Amino acid sequence: MKNILIETITNVCDALNKYDVKYLIIGGTAVALHGHYRISTASDGSPLNKYDLDFWYRPGYENSLNLLKALEELGYNVKELKSKSPDPKKTFYSFEFDIYKADFLPSVPGLDDFMTSYNRKERYKIKEVDVYVISFDDLIISKQTKSRSKDIEDIHNLKSKKQSNDNTLSM
């Protein structure tokens, strides 16, 4: 992965960890962390001109407040969001910076319970920062549920990479 992307991931995750936000990295960034880097694309398949970070956060009032505190520390203007009473089970947050956009989703298609997936998470240590990523199996389920062409391609590439790694380890 590119250094700017790694720096961005660690900055965001460091703030989330500081405020004890329960989250999982999902989407294309999770695909990259599981071993297959690809350029983020828009729904029409065109390449995005910035990094696209997707997070699944535990829906709940306290975790949502902690998420807003972390986002505020990252420089997001969350005053208006704090003044409202968003429904944490339905609230989707999307923020854009110059080099990246970050989406925070309260649910993931195909996966029913955040804590079940959270308990299966994979933890990576990147530049001394704990980074929590959706498990390989849950990532595959979410990709199968969406079934967009890029999701099908991700599934193929991830399974090929995993099979290649499994074959290498067994020799």
Image: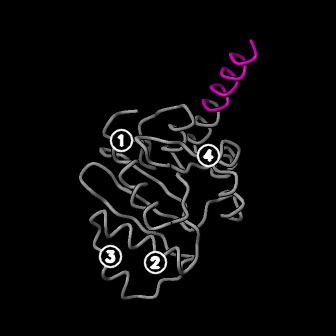
- Rendered image quadrant of residue 151: top right
Label 2: few (<14), some (14–19) or many (≥20) C-alpha neighbours in 10 Å: some
Q: Position of residue 44 (x, y in %)?
A: 44, 47
Label 3: few (<14), some (14–19) or many (≥20) C-alpha neighbours in 10 Å: some
| Kind of residue indicated by mark 1 | Leu
Q: Which residue was labeled with disc 1?
A: 5
* Closer to viewer: mark 4 or mark 3: 4
Q: Earlier in the sequence, mark 4 or mark 3?
A: 3
Q: CA distance from mark 4 to mark 3?
A: 29 Å
Q: CA distance from mark 3 to mark 2?
A: 10 Å
Label 4: few (<14), some (14–19) or many (≥20) C-alpha neighbours in 10 Å: some
Q: Find the magenta span and give its range.
A: 157-171
Q: Which residue was labeled with disc 4?
A: 122
- Rendered image quadrant of residue 14: bottom left
| Kind of residue indicated by mark 2 | Leu
Label 1's element? helix
Q: Which residue was labeled with disc 2?
A: 65
Secondary structure mainly formed by the magenta segment:
helix
* Closer to viewer: mark 1 or mark 2: 2
| Kind of residue indicated by mark 3 | Val
Q: Which residue was labeled with disc 3?
A: 78
- Left or right: where does residue 8 sit relative to residue 33? left
| Kind of residue indicated by mark 4 | Glu
Q: CA distance from mark 1 to mark 2?
A: 26 Å
**How many marks do you count on the picture?**
4
Q: Earlier in the sequence, mark 4 or mark 2?
A: 2
